[in-house]
Image (cartoon, coloured by chain):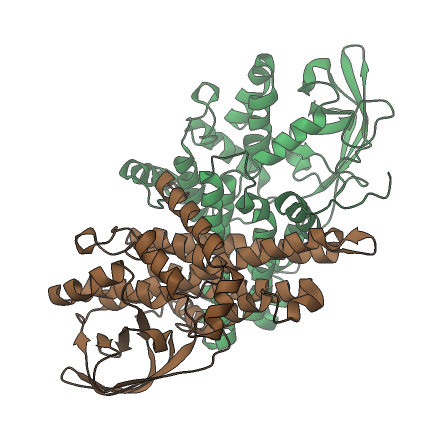
Chain colours: A brown, B green
Amino acid sequence: MEFAFTEEQAMIAETARDFFRENATSERTRKAMAGEGIDRELWQAFGAELGLAGLTVPEEHGGSGLGMVELAIIAEAAGSQVSAIPLLGHAMACAAIGAGGSDEAKAAWLPRLAAGEAICAIASTHSTLEADGDKLTGTIQCVPHGAVADLLLVAAPKGMWLVETAAKGVSIEGHTTMDQTRPLATVMLDGAAATPLAQSFDVTMAAWSAGWIVLAAEALGGAQETLERTVAYSLDRVQFGRQIGSFQAYKHRLADMMIEIEQARSAVYWAACAVDEGSDEAQMALHAAKSFCADTFFMCAGNMIQLHGGIGFTWEHDAHLFFKRARSIQTMLMDGEFHREQVARMVLGEAA
Amino acid sequence: MKLGFSKAEEEFRAEAADWLQGQMAGEFKDIKGITTLTEKAERRKEWEQQLAAHKWSCIGWPVEWGGRGASLAEQVIFAEEYARAGVPGRVNHIGIELAGPTILTFGTEEQKQRFLPGIAAGTTIFCQGFSEPNAGSDLGNVRTKARLDGDEWVVNGQKIWTSLAHISDWIFVVARSGEGSKGPKGLTFLMMDMHQPGIEIRPIEQINGDAEFNETFFDDARCPADSLIGTEGEGWRVAMGLLAFERGVSTLGQQMAFRNELDAIIAAAKDNGKANNPLIRQRIAKAEIGLRLMRYGALRMLSNTDHSAIDGAALTYKIQWATWRRGLGELAMDVLGQAGEIASGDAYEWDVLPNLFLYSRADTIYGGTNQIQRNQIAERGLGLPREPRGDK
């Protein structure tokens, strides 16, 4: 038992933190928000220059073969700057194809994903989706970064599929979305050619695990950043002849943020370790991390607006970027009530 | 980053679990499952000696002083198995976790020989004399006085909230020895024998009807001149060092006791049908998640070797568990319904869950109130300006 980063992990964390601080600037993110909701240059640099897109891809397919702890580390750094990159679908696709792709599918997609050349989106929210042989028909709502994706990871009741967005029978409609750093799209499939991944619980869980860890870690990074920026503001801003950070009503709200964030940090790295170590606590840890971190981020981002006063409500200030990202994470890949209900079933001994 | 335990550690877990469960099924089955600190005190002193006789009393201490020099992981494991087996809390917690490590760190060789064997053997029970009526949150405002009279210290004043003073043999006291000194300066840390006419104990009846805490009065109480730990006037430094030990592995054992409480709530909810209520289900899940995160927060804190950096997990730990447990008490009552408001007998005595509801109101007060915790987190953790004092 050693619940602390190894030297290598600490190095990855520092590299990733510096990279996003330096490059995922407010200016660049806002440019992405006004466009397609993606900073392609940032994603390119992340994949090609830093080589981080291949983090969890096995070495024989051009990646680094690392695990969920390392994925959490980079997602935390990306989330801390609300960067507009398609990391969520990417991490889920790497996990799903790695766990359940045929040799052909692995060879076709993993090297491209590892190089950051292909963009993948997770398509999981649908009411009707029908498979006829290897062709899918149906409408999938709320696909994050769906409008810029090359590949869709479609989560259907009977396992997961890969669908190329350029294929015949695929049409995608992007939406103006509250969180403009990860816009949602509607995907319509009309007999679109699809490649099935191996149908097993392990494959599905590999994808969901990566997705929940990315969102939880993004939320952790975002929450920590809202705290740090608000602390800085509170030391700078003077009212009644005092720094506003000296008022107890203000201090205590910041303290409450730190209390939640420390637990969120435990949650993210507990879940990541549990998945990497194949622990029988992994399921509970994932549900705990996703629900707890999303709530923590939302609370912190809401406080960031409140504690900045009027300036925090302006478009010009970055507080709303965090606030909107936090709101979207709360619902993305199932909401807090769903995840807590899974935990309740486990502790009440009702789990299947 | 690694959460799993090694094979050797798992073997250690099996050995500890086996011995503890054997004791709770055998010679000490009469104390199994007790959740208050006051019930069957005499038997629990015998239990302290039983632990010592089998080298399970202070496993983290060095071997030469009766410990096992156990690794951090082993201490974590023992604390977990201890509570899992339903063994009641240690009546000599203060001696083992606070007095012992303080003497090991700040005491002289002679003091180690004088005090450590008795603590290790479970024959010397310690209590803590820090808080006073006017030195609660403002701990530096101690007024109890100590003056050297020949080869003895003479102590006068009053301590309060002295947990288990009525069954303790020794007390460590922070007293003002510097004439006219104020605040943290001029304090001295003394070890005093409780069995003397100059010390009087009065129990404080609590909202749950129990009396774990006491007022402790010092009226020309005495101890030998060499009873001070550290140097004269440096008592604050020793006291602060002691408080740092409090965030040790015992927290893991405390969590296992919380586990037992949450399990009792879950069992009650399944029994009376509240487990079908979606709102209660969400709250049970939240409680479960909070407890798990407490464990991993403690493991992060214990794995942290960079003591120069601010340890956020350690700084936020107290308010986290205390607030969680207060919520657990409220959940317990919502699950039990009105049945939870009827005492277990004619006396004002409570079953585990209603008692948890009442007792947990103290958790967010003792050892630093939630308000003070938030000040400290903001000031030490986030670097915000300190609270102004009204007396400067």
Residue B173 x/y as whole percent = 71, 29
Residue sitting nearer the eye, A310 or B324: A310
Q: Quadrant of the C terminus of chain A?
A: bottom left
Compared to residue B41, the image places residue B374 above or below, namely: below
Total marks placed: 0
Residue B36 x/y as whole percent = 58, 48
Q: What residue appears at the point 41 percent right and 58 percent down from the top-left corner?
A: A75
Q: Residue furthest top?
A: B150
The answer to whether residue B348 shows anywhere in this view is no
The answer to whether residue A93 shows anywhere in this view is yes
Q: What residue appears at the point 46 percent right and 52 percent down from the top-left corner?
A: A266
User: For this view, does A241 lie left or right of residue B110?
Assistant: right
Compared to residue B117, the image places residue A194 above or below, namely: below
- Asked which quadrant contains residue A214, the reply is bottom left
Residue B190 x/y as whole percent = 70, 23
Residue sitting nearer the eye, A106 or A317: A317
Q: What residue appears at the point 32 percent right and 63 percent down from the top-left corner?
A: A91
Residue sitting nearer the eye, B344 or A287: A287
- Asked which quadrant contains residue A169, the reply is bottom left
Q: Quadrant of the N terminus of chain A?
A: top left
Residue B107 x/y as whole percent = 60, 19
- Asked which quadrant contains residue A306, the reply is bottom right
Q: What residue appears at the point 43 percent right and 32 percent down from the top-left corner?
A: B56
